[in-house]
Image (cartoon, rainbow, N blue to C red):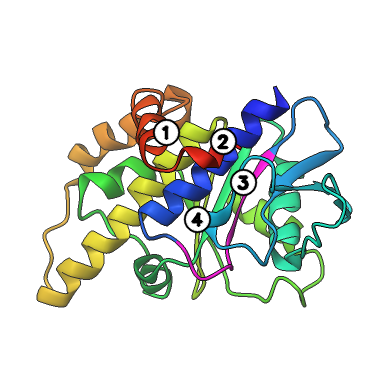
């Protein structure tokens, strides 16, 4: 089971690279290890996302220690990543994957007073399970992981104000899909607001169906899309499985 999780997490990193969700070696995606409840998987801070494979992911303890599964690998721990991901995974036992990104559109919308607006179907998918968190340096503020988890609550997506996006999923597929729709919604909002200050908003009645479509209780989501995404990676970057 743990090897399957490693491959799915490596796939998420490669998909983040494919869709342009990267920020050099910063940002992070994590996975719970079902056969090793004291640890989770995270990227090493010195690797670009298109270098990540199933075997070079770092096994982390929840108290912040990297387990060197490959002696001599010299893994570099991303402290901010550990604080964010350990806090969310500890607080949400039903969640198995966490994605945090600094996409250009995600940061832009996170800094807008209105936050994410009901301007697209993509927005409707996530607005029913979206929260927000004020900007704080996660390496400076005490208990930032706990505070993040508290603001996320039972939701599956969050705008980190002036910072970026965070989503969670019960499966890799679900985490991917929530991030995909949230990022697309942010891109669309930035495009619309660049062209008008009087956007047409989806009516509340119409939004109800969209909220139901993206509601966590109607998931896990992403099972339809995930196999085709894995096939794409197997055709183009099969080394991610190694």
Q: Residues within 10 Å of mark 2 (few under 14, many from 20)?
A: some
**Mark on residue 153?**
3
In the depicted structure, whether residue 114 falls above or below residue 71: below
Q: Which residue is mark 1?
A: 234
- Relative placement, left or right, of 5 versus 69 is left
Question: Residue 102 in the image: x percent, y percent?
Answer: 48, 67
N-term mark: 3 or 4: 4
Residue with the mark numbered 2: 241
What SS does tag 4 mark? helix
Q: Marks 2 and 1: CB-CB under 8 Å? A: yes
In space, the residues marked 2 and 1 are separated at their CA atoms by 8 Å
Of badges 3 and 1, nearer the viewer stands 1
Tell me, for residue 50, which label it has, or none: 4
Q: Residues within 10 Å of mark 1 (few under 14, many from 20)?
A: some
* Mark earlier in primary sequence (2, 3): 3
Q: Quadrant of residue 168?
A: top right
Range of residues picked out in magenta: 22-31
């Amino acid at each position: 089971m743990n090897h399957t999780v490693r491959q799915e997490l490596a796939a998420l990193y490669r998909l983040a690279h494919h869709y342009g969700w990267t920020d050099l070696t910063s940002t992070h995606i994590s996975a719970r290890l079902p056969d090793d409840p004291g640890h989770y998987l995270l990227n090493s801070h010195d690797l670009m996302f298109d270098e990540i494979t199933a075997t070079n992911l770092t096994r982390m303890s929840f108290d912040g220690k990297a387990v060197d599964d490959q002696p001599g690998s010299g893994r570099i721990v991303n402290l901010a990543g550990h604080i964010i991901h350990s806090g969310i995974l500890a607080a949400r036992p039903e969640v198995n994957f966490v994605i945090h990104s600094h996409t250009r559109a995600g940061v832009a919308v996170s800094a807008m007073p209105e936050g994410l607006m009901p301007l697209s179907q993509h927005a409707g998918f996530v607005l029913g399970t979206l929260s927000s968190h004020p900007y704080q340096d996660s390496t400076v503020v005490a208990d930032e992981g706990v505070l993040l988890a508290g603001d996320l609550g039972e939701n599956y997506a969050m705008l980190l104000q002036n910072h970026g996006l965070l989503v969670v999923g019960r499966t890799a597929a679900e985490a991917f899909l929530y991030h995909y729709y949230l990022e697309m919604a942010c891109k669309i909002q930035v495009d619309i607001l660049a062209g008008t200050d009087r956007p047409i908003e989806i009516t509340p009645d119409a939004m109800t169906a969209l909220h139901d479509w993206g509601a966590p209780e109607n998931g896990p989501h992403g099972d339809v899309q995930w196999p085709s995404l894995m096939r794409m990676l197997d055709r183009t970057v099969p080394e991610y499985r190694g």
